[in-house]
Image: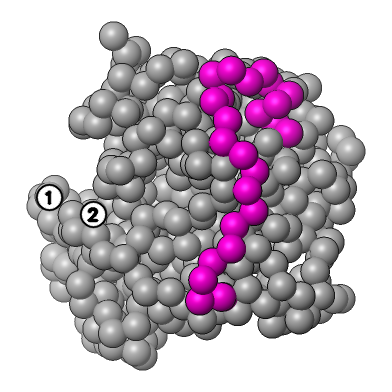
């Protein structure tokens, strides 16, 4: 029987426009792109030129620090552009897709018969190893790291997040193969929710299954690491998105790279919230075309509303993105005497509005912060919604002041920016907590390099 961990701290934010249990497949787009910034912590070196032809699974760029870590093209076709920004930073590599897709044959393998080195070499050769992240630092890991454990969270509970069980349908064998492969490298933990029904989750083999029962962010893999096997200085754990596990499993079962994934297209700005089968690197224009309530005064988010990136229709689906959300921007809001009205359509954790009486109500919240950044208020707000055994407010203060010794004492090695997403939402000081944590982790990584 699976171990159950009950979490009481957290906050579920119910937003309008959650994707319904219906799935469609998008037609092929003409152009796709892989974005290096989707793989945090790498320094990309482009290995192709404009006009080159690539097959699915062929590397578009590698990590300068570890050249064996390649990043595979999601489609076969012709390289049309290598887009660069300031100081020649690589923003994306664009590929014009062939009508008939060509795949590199990496050979079918039974992961149960492989050892750790063979699994790792297979993922490196196919350009999939970069989809594995690590703690500390919350970055794409490297092949030299020796993880004491590997964590996979199949519980998605952020606002408007897609249900992984919908993506899992039809991919059960690949998911299990991916888990078996990871278990060859180190002890692997699978986190699921109390409502999980799929046998591929509840009866998965070669892993230790743990049920996390509680409000958001119970599904955050950092929260699960904190409760199962916390990271101390000098230790490394790997964290893998469940979709990446499917990618790995397909590689072993089919002998090819297949970056098809199911995403939720959600939010009150979407006409028909639904699930879509598409590829990593698909233009958001193709995903959202004909499905927007309006084209102005909206916020398109590559990801969920709390942790995703602000985007536009010219951007591309992120490598780790499980949902594309559209919510009101709020730049045309008119709230005359708003502060004196009951405001039953607004959400508040502090019971400032009567809406706290309607616990199951869904809200149409916009992207406004509703207030400017101010001095940090030591009120215990973070601790109420962060189910980790750390002093969150003191850790944030240590990061802001650059006190590295204090950061280490307060547990910075086991956190990632997304762990502070709910705390950022409820923060009266309006501080960009995820940005602060990211900068703190980057600084610490440089200091320890």
Can I make out residue 430 in this image? Answer: no
Residue tagged by mark 2?
14
Horizontally, residue 36 falls left or right of residue 208, namely right
* Image coords of residue 231 (percent x, y): 64, 23
- Residue 297's disc number: none
53 or 389, nearer to the observer: 53
Residue 209 is covered by the magenta coloring: no
| For residue 393, side relative to residue 441 (left or right) | left
Colouring rule applied to residues: one colour
**Magenta extent:** 97-121
Name which residue lies at 37% across and 74% down. 27
Q: Are marks 1 and 2 in contact (CB under 8 Å)?
A: yes
In magenta segment, residue 99: yes
Image coordinates of residue 214 in percent, x first then y, are: 29, 31
Q: Which residue is mark 1?
A: 360
Magenta portion: prevailing SS class: loop
Q: Nearer the viewer, residue 58 or 309?
A: 58
Q: Is residue 396 left or right of residue 204?
A: right
């Amino acid at each position: 029987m699976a171990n159950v961990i009950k979490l009481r701290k957290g906050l579920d934010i119910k937003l309008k426009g959650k994707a319904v249990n219906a799935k469609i497949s998008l037609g092929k787009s003409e152009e796709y792109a892989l974005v290096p910034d989707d793989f945090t912590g790498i320094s990309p070196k482009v290995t192709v030129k404009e006009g080159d032809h690539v097959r699915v699974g062929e590397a578009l760029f590698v990590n300068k620090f570890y050249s064996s870590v390649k990043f595979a093209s999601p489609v076969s076709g012709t390289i049309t552009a290598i887009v660069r920004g300031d100081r020649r930073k690589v923003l994306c590599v664009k590929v014009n897709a062939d009508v008939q897709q060509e795949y590199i044959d990496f050979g079918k393998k039974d992961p149960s018969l492989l050892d750790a080195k063979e699994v790792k070499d297979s993922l490196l050769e196919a350009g999939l190893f970069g989809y594995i992240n690590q703690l500390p630092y919350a970055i794409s890991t490297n092949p030299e790291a020796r993880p004491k454990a590997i964590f996979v969270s199949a519980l998605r509970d952020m606002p408007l997040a897609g249900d992984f069980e919908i993506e899992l349908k039809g991919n059960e064998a690949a998911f299990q193969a991916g888990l078996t492969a990871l278990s060859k490298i180190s002890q692997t933990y699978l986190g699921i929710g109390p409502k999980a029904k799929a046998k591929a989750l509840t009866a998965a083999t070669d892993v230790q299954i743990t049920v996390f029962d509680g409000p958001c962010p119970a599904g955050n893999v950092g929260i699960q690491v904190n409760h199962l096997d916390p990271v101390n200085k000098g230790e490394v754990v790997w964290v893998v998105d469940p979709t990446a596990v499917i990618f790995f499993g397909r590689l072993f079962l089919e002998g090819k790279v297949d970056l098809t994934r199911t995403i939720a297209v959600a939010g009150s700005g979407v006409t028909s919230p639904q699930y879509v089968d598409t590829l990593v690197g698909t233009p958001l224009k193709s995903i959202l075309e004909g499905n927007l309530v309006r084209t102005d005064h909206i916020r398109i988010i590559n990801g969920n509303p709390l942790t995703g990136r602000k985007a536009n229709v010219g951007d591309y689906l992120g490598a780790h993105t499980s949902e594309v959300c559209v919510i009101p921007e709020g730049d045309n809001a008119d709230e005359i005497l708003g502060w004196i009205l009951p405001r039953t359509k607004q959400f508040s954790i502090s019971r400032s509005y009567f809406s706290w009486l309607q616990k199951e109500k869904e809200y149409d919240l916009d992207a406004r912060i509703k207030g400017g950044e101010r001095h940090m208020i030591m009120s215990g707000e973070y601790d109420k919604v962060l189910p980790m055994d750390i002093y969150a407010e003191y850790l944030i203060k240590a990061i802001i002041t650059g006190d590295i010794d204090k950061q280490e004492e307060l547990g910075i090695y086991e956190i990632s920016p997304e762990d502070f997403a709910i705390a950022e939402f409820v923060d009266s000081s309006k501080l960009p907590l995820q940005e602060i944590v990211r900068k703190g982790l980057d600084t610490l990584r440089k200091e320890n390099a």
